């Protein structure tokens, strides 16, 4: 019996190891239904929370979340105060600072991402919107620090005024802002919550279509490269399940009422 115990210990060394903690910074407002703060001991809720839990479960990883504004999240991970943040879109500048999946082979082609995010323009229903025909009046707003904000700035379409998601959608409904660009599911969710679905609509064309990632600071990645690589790999199946459930939900809700 003692020999069997020794053999089991030798074959399964991870049984004697404490779980590795991933401290993850997230933006608690403006990201529902993907992730949002809750009153449950600081544990957030949402689609990404479920996905990350699924990916971490077989690996003896404990996920520990901290809420902060998006720009603050980026800074804390960059300064090694926290291990990771989400949901980040790759850029050449960010790629030098944070550890993305498959950095050597091209992160933008990686399958180990969280979600493929579409960024339409949420506009007044009474004013049809097409990117090719857009002429700025009040401009288009977007969440502070997002890649889509940089894109709008480059086009000369960005509003001079900064608005949170809820503020921006209300300004669009009141005709005081040409549009607000945010991820399609998030924008639709908040329109429903604000009871503005009859006043604001999402454009069919998108400003951007980009993959979201969970990224790590480079020091922490260098401490646990194999664990993080496997964690990223596990995200593929977890995301595909979420995508299948989302497509099923969309198909069900689009069926005509009988």
Image (cartoon, rainbow, N blue to C red):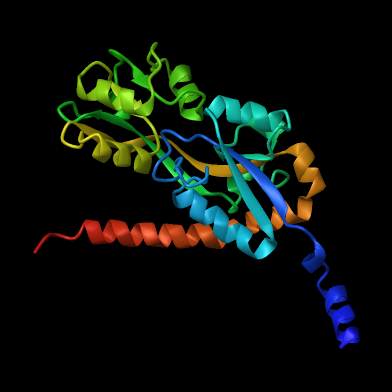
Q: Is residue 256 visible?
A: yes
**Which quarter of the picture shows residue 54?**
bottom right
- In this view, the residue in front, 119 or 81, is 81
Q: Is residue 143 left or right of residue 12?
A: left
Specify whether 168 is left or right of 239: left
Snapshot quadrant of residue 85:
top right
Return the x and y of residue 108 as percentages of the image width and height: 59, 43
Which residue appears at 42% of the width and 15% of the height? 156
Instruction: Tell me where residue 214 sits by quadrant.
Output: top right
Q: Is residue 14 left or right of residue 140?
A: right
Q: Position of residue 170 (x, y in %)?
A: 26, 24
Quick one: quadrant of the C terminus? bottom left
- Comparing 237 with 203, the one in front is 237
- Please report the residue visible at 45 percent of the width from the left and 43 percent of the height from the top: 39
- The image shows residue 142, relative to residue 257, as above or below, that is above
Q: Nearer the viewer, residue 170 or 119?
A: 170
């Amino acid at each position: 019996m003692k020999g069997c115990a020794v053999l089991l210990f030798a074959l399964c060394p991870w049984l004697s190891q404490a779980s590795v903690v991933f401290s993850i910074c997230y933006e608690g407002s403006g990201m529902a239904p993907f992730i949002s703060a809750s009153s449950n001991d600081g544990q957030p809720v949402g689609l990404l929370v479920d996905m990350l839990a699924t990916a971490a479960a077989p690996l003896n990883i404990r996920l520990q979340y901290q809420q902060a504004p998006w720009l603050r999240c980026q800074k804390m991970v960059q300064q090694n105060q926290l291990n990771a943040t989400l949901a980040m879109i790759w850029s050449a500048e960010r790629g030098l600072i944070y550890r993305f999946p498959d950095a050597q082979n091209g992160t933008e082609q990686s399958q180990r991402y969280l979600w493929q995010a579409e960024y339409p323009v949420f506009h007044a229903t009474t004013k049809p919107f097409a990117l090719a025909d857009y002429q700025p009046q009040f401009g288009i707003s977007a969440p502070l620090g997002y890649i889509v904000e940089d894109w709008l700035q480059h086009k000369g379409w960005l509003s001079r005024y900064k608005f949170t998601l809820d503020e921006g959608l209300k300004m669009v409904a009141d005709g005081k802002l040409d549009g607000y660009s945010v991820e399609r599911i998030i924008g639709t969710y908040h329109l429903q919550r604000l009871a503005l679905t009859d006043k604001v609509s999402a454009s069919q064309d998108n400003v951007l279509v980009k993959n979201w990632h969970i990224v790590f600071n480079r020091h922490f990645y260098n401490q646990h490269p194999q664990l993080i690589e496997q964690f990223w790999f596990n995200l593929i199946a977890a995301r595909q399940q979420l995508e299948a459930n989302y497509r099923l939900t969309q198909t069900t809700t689009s069926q005509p009422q009988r």
